Amino acid sequence: MKRTLIKQVLASTEPSDTLRVQGWVRTRRDAKGVSFLELNDGSCLSNLQVVVDPAVSVDLAAFTTGSAAEVEGRLVPSPAAGQAWELQATRLHLIGPADAGYPLQKKGHSLEFLRTIAHLRPRSNLFGAVFRTRSRLAHAGHQFFQERDFFYIHTPIITTSDCEGAGEMFRVTTLKGSLEGDPQADFFGRRAYLTVSGQLEAETFACALSNVYTFGPTFRAENSNTARHAAEFWMIEPEMAFCDLAEDMDLAEEFVRAMARYTLDHCAEDLKFFARFVDRGIEDRLRFVADRTFERIPYAEAIRILEQSGRAFEYPVQAGRNLQSEHERYLTEDHCQRPVTVFNYPREIKPFYMRRNDDGATVAAMDVLVPGIGEVIGGSQREERLDPLREAMAFHQLPEDDYAWYLDLRRFGTVPHAGFGLGFERLLMFLTGVGNIRDVIPFARTPGSADF
Amino acid sequence: MKRTLIKQVLASTEPSDTLRVQGWVRTRRDAKGVSFLELNDGSCLSNLQVVVDPAVSVDLAAFTTGSAAEVEGRLVPSPAAGQAWELQATRLHLIGPADAGYPLQKKGHSLEFLRTIAHLRPRSNLFGAVFRTRSRLAHAGHQFFQERDFFYIHTPIITTSDCEGAGEMFRVTTLKGSLEGDPQADFFGRRAYLTVSGQLEAETFACALSNVYTFGPTFRAENSNTARHAAEFWMIEPEMAFCDLAEDMDLAEEFVRAMARYTLDHCAEDLKFFARFVDRGIEDRLRFVADRTFERIPYAEAIRILEQSGRAFEYPVQAGRNLQSEHERYLTEDHCQRPVTVFNYPREIKPFYMRRNDDGATVAAMDVLVPGIGEVIGGSQREERLDPLREAMAFHQLPEDDYAWYLDLRRFGTVPHAGFGLGFERLLMFLTGVGNIRDVIPFARTPGSADF
């Protein structure tokens, strides 16, 4: 008999005489003349209640929390509250035992403790819900772009260029002794690094296929031990030819709204769990975001709002400087009380590839800020004019030789184009209410930590 | 007026009075009193023919091959053969010029030359087709698993464990001088590498969510300069709990068949191009694969077949050794003339995690071999029994301490489970007929080469 997933069992519309399920025992309760097993197979949050009467001859004591079991039985309407169905076991088989040393006994565990058993935590309610949601939203992201005729591009992970010019990159090497010797002796014949963004490479594809996106891992060797930073994280980076900043903001906002809508519509059971145990207001917030247009504020106005806020920020507000997380959150949570897109940033604080505005002082950049997180998307219209781009590279002290291929895009059939980068983990934090990036990544990589 | 993609224009069911398209000029042909522009925007293989009569006052000489243009006009049935529609321009605007230095002039180019301009080659017919197909098949892979209730897991790229025990890994570091000093001084406080497989981590998730898959980049620091090897490539790795080798082979074969079917159904225009210019037999081969069950042969029988083949192989056939590419191709191309799954390999030549068969000598491993490529999938049932696994680790000289978390899966609620790894680029080579892995990767990384 073929296995039925518990998700499908619980969605049954009628009873069944024979059914076979496999999963892990969450709890067992022995009452007079009957025992109840809560069985979970990870296909959904809910357990299936298995009712075992003494006629089923089996040593029930072995069916402990964490053990793996196979059950055959009859699916019947459950008399118990809160569940439509229960399985009356006709055969019970222990697949893999779990002794009292199993760390996920039925009791509350701190998130810190669960991080130390990242190989077992997906068996808990919270992390099952988080990683089912992560999977569904990753797929929803693909669907969003594929339906709109965007092509998915696998930009390289190992790179010899530094997109942001930020310098905080991991080196990739097959050298053994010294790193300072002749780079030609290394695997690629030169120094190589882990990418911080696929944007520059995605631009080459947008200038051929019109609309493209990346979805892959990116890396920062930043010594930041915060709840929002990881050394390895996944980014989604669409890039559109024949596109300006306004259309770029349209797409970014539409994407965030669509993901909020998708979570409400397709992750309802797990979302209810987040609402109950993680963030009480999460469902309302997602509905609010899904239904509303975002505010749009030029950077200069954002600075005025912050200056007039009367707030004592830890980092003082200063025109011409980057917004700090506390500033971003004031704008979206307090001033606007909805997602905000801030655009037209000072040239000095943004990378070389952003298109200079006619005012000469600002570039066509934008950041989407959401409540609870701050920046979740950063994007820009790219500088498609050869001379202004070269001038910007000189301004940012970048050697033209390293970017010859990038300049070629401006030499041959250049077009206005724009795109953005979305940190997938930050989006997940926003959509689930989970407060630490370590808890939305299967195995997080942070300073001093790369276990498993 | 909003832009219409050429893909949509060419799929029109009726004429249109006003249409706006944007793209790149492939060629211009000036005839008496009229000019023709072939415009391509990458949304599909076909160009849109733009007809420009002298009433449109514009300097046509600037509309050279490679230049970017915007056209407004009337869509009318085309009198020319081979195309249903043409666009009669009412307005023509040059967006970005391309002078005679543009490398992709209308003439044949060698694949070797095109690799040196990987930033421009997606504008060619061949590479447009390759990367549209790559995008569609990546999405098709996600759909295949999501429809079957598999969860997509982002296993870590940076790792401190060596799944295959093969040792050919890239080191990831923030150290500056020597690599030999105290590993605690490095970013993660220990030596870190780029992953060769997400399998071990995927197993932890299968033992929680039942059915999972990965789709991400993997790395080999192997000094192999062949048409089938790259240092960075994408793998799809499903992992199923409560699953044995037979079901694993079922899924692997179903996946290959489904991808062949998808290519025929959803990449028809690009596939026709491959059939015309790359591999004449490709469509027949895909139909053949999509419609047929695969052969299944135990390793021992495969050895007998090879020994009795009468072929003079470069590498002699030897029981107990790995099959070479030439052996694999003989089995699939000559002997069986269809895809073949070889299973039950000698224990000695396979990694520690594969489940030992009752014969004691073989493990529950399988490889799917396809014509023209050889191995495209490798998989196994995993050793879920704690003692045999520890024994296998000792046999392969692996320290248990490094795999404590992996052993935990066998301590707590262990279940039979199985999975496989599919090299996405090899699948693409098989489905497009493209013969070199460098030509199905946007920016290939190979020994001595990590440009762009």
Image (cartoon, coloured by chain):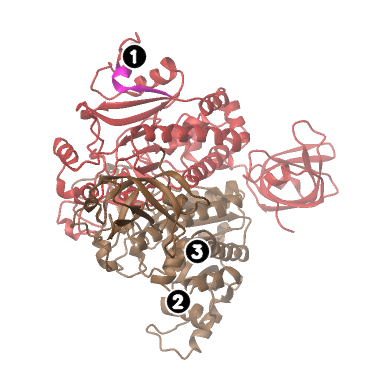
Chain colours: A red, B brown
Q: Is residue A275 above or below residue A71?
A: above
What amino acid type should be assigned to the residue bearing mark 1? Ile
- Direction from residue A248 to residue B12 in the image, left or right: right
Give the class, few, some or many, for how many residues have Cα within 10 Å of label 3's Cα (few <14, many ≥20).
Answer: many
Residue A219 appearing in the image: yes
Q: Name the residue: 49% across, 65% down.
A: B377
Could you tell me which chain the residue with mark 3 belongs to? B
Task: Determine whether the residue tagged by mark 1 lies in a helix, strand or loop.
Answer: helix
Could you tell me which chain the residue with mark 2 belongs to? B
Question: Is B107 in the magenta?
Answer: no
What amino acid type should be assigned to the residue bearing mark 2? Leu
Q: Which residues are magenta?
A: A295-303
Q: Which residue is mark 1?
A: A305
Mark before the other along the chain sequence, 3 or 2: 2
Q: Are marks 3 and 2 on the same chain?
A: yes
Q: Residue furthest top?
A: A310
Q: Which residue is mark 2?
A: B323
Viewer-nearest residue: B445 or A1: B445
Viewer-nearest residue: A317 or A417: A417
Question: Is A299 in the magenta?
Answer: yes
Viewer-nearest residue: A307 or B173: A307
Q: Is residue A245 above or below residue B307?
A: above
Q: Position of residue B5 (x, y in %)?
A: 42, 48
Q: Are marks 1 and 3 on the same chain?
A: no
